[in-house]
Image: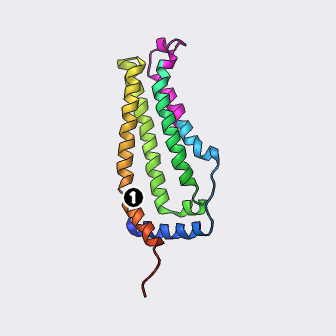
Amino acid sequence: MTINNRIILQEVAELKKILSEGGAEIPSFWACLWPGLVMVAWNTLCAIISVDNDYLSSKYIFRVMIFPVGVSFMILLGVASARSLFLSVPRSFRVNSNAYHFVNRKITAYAFIYMLVNLLLACFNRVFYGAPFPFAFMTILATVFFVIVMNLDFGRYQLTALTSLLQSIKPSTEK
């Protein structure tokens, strides 16, 4: 399914009506936070997988965890912020919205691909390097790459969404 200007215009008008009637919801803290925590746990697991057993001692564990977990906490903040905005729209609208389904599928696909890439990088690092810093560098590069690609991908829809929003807000002056 693709999203076009007509669908976005219809859904923005419907959302405007719902929100003007006070239909916004305040999502729970947990609902906003759990996907980011999954990413933190996954990147922590991948960091452990990525190194030889010698690095898992208390002497080196900080070196193993600092960059992958640090990157994960930055991801957690971004995910929680975006998800709080996403979930503040009433559930009835989210369930019936084609644009929300489209965005949700894209984000889910990006998340699973990122997690798979991170796991593959952890295995690659374990086989060829076994040290924490190459994996940290690979994790940072992969994260930056995914952020750039996601921004480029979702940026394609911003002008259409903004235009639709402005059209729905502007007062009707036509006779």
Q: Is residue 21 above or below residue 99?
A: below
Q: What element does badge 1 sit on? A: helix
Locate residue 99 relative to residue 25 in the image: left or right. left
Residue 48 visible, this angle: no
Residue 51 in view (yes/no): yes
Residue 56 location in percent, x, y? Answer: 51, 15
Residue at horizontal 44%, vertical 82%?
173
Queried whether the magenta region covers residue 20, the answer comes back as no
Give the residue type at disc 1.
Gln
Q: Who is closer to the viewer here, 42 or 63?
A: 63
> Colour mode?
rainbow
Q: Residue at x 51, y 34 (%)?
A: 73
Q: Quadrant of the N terminus?
A: bottom left
Disc tally is 1
Magenta range: 39-62
Task: Please state the horizontal and vertical placement of residue 70, each as a whole percent of the image.
Answer: 49, 30
Taking the spot 47% from the left edge, 77% from the top edge, the residue there is: 171
Query: Where 73 falls versus 83 (above or below)?
Result: above
